[in-house]
Image (tube, grey):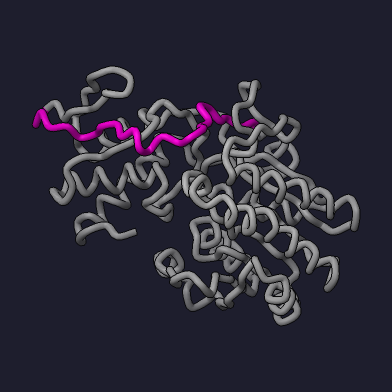
Amino acid sequence: MKKKIALITGVTGQDGAYLANLLLNKGYKVYGTYRRSSSLNLWRLEELGILESVELLSLELLEKSNIERVIKLIKPDEFYNLAAQSFVSLSFENPIYTAQADALGVLKILESIRMIDKKIKFYQASSSEMFGEGDLKKLNENSLFHPRSPYAISKVFGHHITVNYREAYGIFACSGILFNHESPLRGIEFVTRKITSTLAEIRAGRKKVLELGNIYAKRDWGYAGDFVEGIWKMIQNDKPKDYVLATGEEHSVKEFATLAAKLIGFNLVWKGKKFNEYAIDKDTKKIIIKKNMGYYRPSDVSLLKGDPTNAINNLNWKPKIKFKDLVKIMVESDKKKSLKGKILQ
């Protein structure tokens, strides 16, 4: 039997690496793409032990001719678009590039598929940030979007253009609206990994304090390894549909940081109020965590919690790793890395 061929944009990122690992284990031939203009960061693929098994190609989402060349070259059965300018805070600083990559990049892929081979199955990585400040306690596939950042607005376009090409041209195109999903492969610029890596470095004596922005923002945090399985299951459906992947639980940044600190060995006591809130280690009396107003976004989302009922019922998917176990996995990983030296990624 001929191997299925999968093309993953953003393969060097957290989701791309986990997805590549999943597909390789299922017998796929996996191609992964990276931006020519960016430094090639392969540590995630190396950490999973799959670097030699993924064939890497350069691809620039801003160049339609480049997308067409890659599709014609490898003739994928499945196209997973995970590439994006994915930092919400950076999208306020660079909104034009964010829109070009996260919105128009999706359109260019879909138009290339339409022109070359409409049998290619396409997956678009949508985001829970599209919901913004929703009125519902749990957000599902029918909830309204109210995006509050250039990143989220660009993702809304990518989401709707995917629906449009599915309905207008009969392409198997679907979107996964993924709520926050973390792992030891998260970049240290994301708040969860910033928390675990910085606390590990403080414990090792290489850093003094962890600075955070809005510690009362609440998110629905799951495990990335669970979520990529849901992504694959969407593509295996008989008909293309969009699904929310989430845990259905919300936890604050403060809760994440407090639990991580405890697991690393700190005995935190929170003091102060509002913008002057901070946490000290009860044993040493040293400040371990403090607020930094510079990390607040121009407009933020206070709460995001998803309703994965449709995915559970129709994809036979559900998250396996619970919140406390997720934090523990990330803490243990960064504790081990800190013992080997300074944590660089």
Residue 258 drawn above or below residue 105: above
Q: In percent of the image, x 35 and y 37: which residue is there?
A: 294
- Residue 309 pos. (x, y %): 69, 32
Depth order, front residue of 11/153: 153
Q: Is residue 296 left or right of residue 341?
A: right
**Part of the protein shown in magenta:** 283-307
Q: Residue furthest left?
A: 284
Q: Main secondary structure of the magenta part?
A: loop
Q: How many numbered marks are there?
A: 0
Q: Is residue 342 visible?
A: yes
Q: Residue furthest top?
A: 273
Q: In percent of the image, x 64 and y 51: which residue is there?
A: 125
Q: Is residue 84 magenta?
A: no
Q: In percent of the image, x 24 and y 22: which residue is there?
A: 270
- Residue 16 pos. (x, y %): 55, 61
Depth order, front residue of 162/62: 62
Q: In percent of the image, x 39 and y 42: which residue is there?
A: 192
Q: Is residue 167 left or right of residue 52?
A: right
Quarter of image, res 70 = bottom right
- Residue 90 pos. (x, y %): 48, 49
- Residue 300 pos. (x, y %): 51, 32
Quarter of image, res 215 = top left
Q: Is residue 4 visible?
A: no
Is the C terminus in the top left, top right, bottom left or bottom right quadrant? Answer: bottom left
Is the N terminus in the top left, top right, bottom left or bottom right quadrant? Answer: bottom right
Depth order, front residue of 50/212: 212
Residue 307 drawn above or below residue 162: above
